[in-house]
Image (cartoon, rainbow, N blue to C red):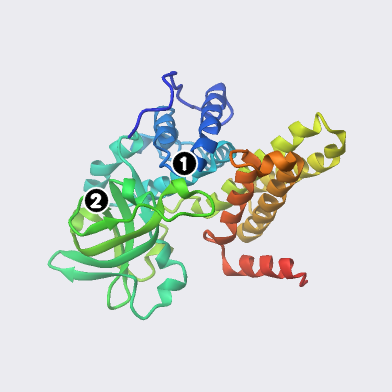
Amino acid sequence: MNQPADNAAVEVVQAPESAAMDALCDRLQTLADQTDRSGDWPAAQLHLCAAAGVFRWFMPATAGGFGWSDADQTRGYLRLAAADLTTTFVITQRMGACRRIEGCENETLQKRWLPPLLDGSQFATVGISHLTTSRRHLSTPVLRAEAVGDGYRLSGYSPWVTGGAHADVIVVGATLDDGRQLLAAVPTDRPGVVAAAGIPLVALSASATDRVDLQDVAIGPDDLIAGPIEDVMSQGVGAGTGGLQTSTLAIGLSKAAVDFLAAEAQQRETLLPVAEQLQTEVRNLEVDLLSVASGNQVCSTADLRGRANRLALRASQAALTAAKGAGFVQGHPAGRWCREALFFLVWSCPQPIANAHLCELAGIE
């Protein structure tokens, strides 16, 4: 992994609200526009996060982590997303893989991967979306598993993998002919693993999200995370609070846009009512998010996602409107926030929420 963009020392972040977190977010924010323009993999940002102990927030002390509560993990994601959405999105996929590995019963697998993943010297990601999207209904699974001896052979592809070309290991899901599914941690140096470099996207292109092909890739018992069983994703192996992550990122983006708007309002009083209204919405949504993350079901995850999506769109467009022509020039964060807000309309967006957005756009009640 590349060195950070500057040589200043990085302090370990022990709490989501701390001077160390402030310093980390300041440095990430400085790099965000640069990465958006170049489309380069955020290696420097990930190095900074590793040095700050970010990858340990999400893991229990027994696994070498800091054991942050679900609420504090959510607070941490909110801070990071407001500073640099692309890097934070990459981290969610990285930690999704780490959670799956930490939550399984395969001690050999855990000893092989968890230490270098927690210290940031190696990178992991996930390729399991096809097990939960419409692709799971295809007559021929996109990624198939065939039993061979005491292991399996994987053939096909995983369609949406973030940072696959930069990963040392990818947690993938595959389906057997009888419909059972398995999860496995596949090293990317295993013969037959071919990761594409990254699709050019409207936003977050630096996440290097693309397909990963697996051509007769052999895996053994030491690579297995779960299965083969029916509907392996419903078993909750290492699932954690992942269902809230996308909403958390959207709220973090909204906060960045609203903070910009509030700063502009200090110079232009006409913006004050708008800034204050959006600040209230962000605070209320953040309160509900943290309540749900703490186990208090004040609202459903679907309600949170819909509200978060709408707020990200409105807050980013408000920031662009306030920035005027300067915001429409490449390199201004307001333009980037508007593009990034579109991400939430398509990434892991449940169909009922997508349908509701379409109805709103069409003026259908």
Percent across and percent down for residue 169 are 29, 49
The residue beneath circle 2 is 187
Which residue is at 39% across, 48% downward?
A: 99
**Residue 331 position by quadrant:** top right
Instruction: For label 1, count other residues whose C-alpha is less than 10 Å away and answer few (under 14), some (14-19) or many (20+).
Output: few
Secondary structure of the residue carrying tag 1 is helix
The residue beneath circle 1 is 38
Q: Looking at the figure, which quarter contains the C terminus? A: bottom right
- Name the residue furthest bottom: 139
**Residue 121 position by quadrant:** top left
Instruction: Tell me whether circle 2 and circle 1 mark residues in contact (CB < 8 Å).
Output: no
Residue 211 left/right relative to 306: left
Percent across and percent down for residue 184 are 28, 57
**Which residue is nearer to you in this view: 105 or 127?**
127
**Kind of residue sitting beneath label 1:** Ser
**Which residue is nearer to you in this view: 251 or 7?**
7
Residue 290 showing in the rendered view: no
**Residue 299 position by quadrant:** bottom right
**Kind of residue sitting beneath label 2:** Pro
Secondary structure of the residue carrying tag 2 is strand
Percent across and percent down for residue 151 are 17, 63
Number of numbered tags placed on the structure image: 2
Which residue is at 71% across, 47% downward?
A: 315
Instruction: For label 2, count other residues whose C-alpha is less than 10 Å away and answer few (under 14), some (14-19) or many (20+).
Output: some
Residue 191 left/right relative to 285: left
Q: Is residue 110 above or below residue 51?
A: below
**Which residue is nearer to you in this view: 284 or 93?**
93
Q: Looking at the figure, which quarter contains the N terminus? A: top left
**Which residue is nearer to you in this view: 204 or 183?**
204
Percent across and percent down for residue 220 are 18, 58
- Name the residue furthest top: 8
Residue 116 showing in the rendered view: yes
